[in-house]
Amino acid sequence: MKLEELERASSAARSRGAQTVVVVGLGFVGTAVAANLSRVDGRRAFFVIGLDRDDEAGRAKAASLDRGEPPCFADDPALATTLRAAAESPRNIAGTVDLDALAQADLVVVCINLDLVREPGQVQRLSCAVDGCAAVLREIGRRIRPGTLVSVESTLPLGASDVKLYPALCLGAREAGRDVDADPPLYAYCYERVMPGPKYLESVNSYWRAFAGIDERSAESARRFLERIVDTDRFPLWRHKQVRAAEMAKLLENTYRAVNIALVDEWARLAEAAGVDLFDVIASIRLRRGTHDNLMSPGLGVGGYCLTKDALLAAWGAEELLAVEAALPFARQAILTNERMPLRAFEALEAHFQGQTSGKRVALLGVTYRPEVADTRSSPSEILARRLLSAGATVLPWDPLVARWEELPLLAMAPSAAQALEGADAAVICIPDRAWTPWLAALLAGRLAPGALVVDPWNLAADALAPHVASGRLSLFVYGRGDLRGPSAP
Ligand SMILES: NC(=O)c1ccc[n+]([C@@H]2O[C@H](COP(=O)([O-])OP(=O)(O)OC[C@H]3O[C@@H](n4cnc5c(N)ncnc54)[C@H](O)[C@@H]3O)[C@@H](O)[C@H]2O)c1
């Protein structure tokens, strides 16, 4: 929408009692946040403006939202239907790349990405472009009216809010001629816990949310906002004492998950060496509800935008922004361990092909980082595919949700699982999609070349494949299933 139209639509919304919210960053999080805001109180509460960068990708996302279409694809049909309804007259959603739209805001919600940059295989030399995020806050400060709450939902390095972002917001406000000592800008940190998958939209408003304000006014303003957009009867809010505590909470909860996964990988190796079925072990331990029921299972690895970086954002922020020591050995080791997990599949292939993986055709079933999510960022399949390609193998990827693999665009996606598997020398089940269970084992046995290796890191098809393994038709390697290999297996 053009700026003049936005101004008209926003003032029309104001005259019927609605507030204007500008959502900055229309990625996976911003898409769900914008959609959720657009439906609050049956579309009467907010006029939602989605703002993205003025580059090709950002313009395309803003244009999608403006048409009432999700700027990012997530496998939740509710996103599309909600946004379509919001774009119908009288519309309460719009997209733009014009920063001046911020002048219309009664509330600003920041959902931009903060990438952690490092070379794979090491976790000491890190960088994060927090100054880029601070520059966004400065632009916001220059344009918003006094009394506008700026609520940041992006995952931040420890210390970012009070060391970088709030000072930048204040600087922008000063540049716009405001007396920030007399009337400080309102800033809250309300980290997002949106859960990718078929209940993506619901996870924004039907889940526990936490927040903190830079001062009391900001915290109260954030509380009032969250109470309108979250089902707080079922999911009461948690107010942190400081914005830094809220930053740490988000980083620790994702680090906890990453460490849990890394721990199980260590025990998967032990179970394989000791001839034990780790899935049997874990199923028994999980019966201890309340203390042990979230112990993870073995798998190909960890992917997505969050679990692969957040533990390191804590370390980077502590050291670079707060100048405090942050060895965090568990956190750093978890990231390294998880990053290496997909390479265990490569090692199994190398062992099977006796070091002659070059020229072999390897099918990868699933290239996203989890079932029912179309997000391919940092997927374990990517690590495995790159390793296979560097070894000279032919990689045959298939994924029901991915037509083009953004990170590896030269690899053509197979149109079906059957076509990926046809005559292949090996297959790796890269995501644990239970919807595949009814047909997976038969397809693997029917399509792969005789003697092919199936790597099943999740134990998804192992039992169904047993007769084909027993007959010598296929070989099988399952992470953590030492019982299938025997204690003396390599
Ligand atoms: N993806 C998740 O499931 C999830 C869950 C919880 C928290 N988070 C956190 O939320 C944040 C966003 O994640 P995401 O997955 O949506 O990222 P994303 O990369 O999908 O989206 C970020 C969006 O911000 C836009 N952007 C970047 N700089 C901008 C600028 N200067 N002005 C306007 N727009 C700008 C980008 O163009 C992009 O559209 C991250 O900090 C992430 O760690 C993500």
Image: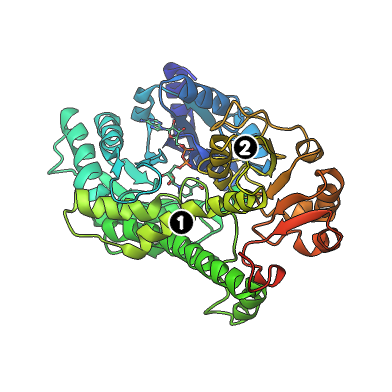
Residue 195 visible in the displayed image: no
Vertical comparison of 38 with 59: above or below = below
- Under circle 1, the secondary element is helix
Looking at the picture, which amino acid does disc 1 mark?
Answer: Glu
Residue at the limit of the structure toward the bottom, as seen here? 288
Q: Residue at x 21, y 53 (%)?
A: 319
Front one among 238 and 186? 238
Vertical comparison of 276 with 203: above or below = below
Residue 6 shown left or right of residue 470 in the figure:
left
> Residue 300, position in %: x, y?
59, 54
Report the coloring of the rendering: rainbow
- Locate the C terminus by quadrant: bottom right
The residues tagged by marks 2 and 1 sit, at their Cα atoms, a distance apart of: 57 Å
Residue 420 shown left or right of residue 479 in the figure:
right
Residue 64 visible in the displayed image: yes
- Using the rendered view, name the quadrant where residue 109 is placed: top left
Residue matched to label 1: 227
Q: Quadrant of ligand 1?
A: top left
> Residue 187, position in %: x, y?
29, 47
Dot 1: within a 10 Å radius of its alpha carbon, few (fewer than 14), some, or many (20 or more) residues? Answer: some
Looking at the picture, which amino acid does disc 2 mark?
Answer: Ser
Vertical comparison of 375 with 445: above or below = above
Q: Residue at x 50, y 67 (%)?
A: 266
Residue matched to label 2: 358
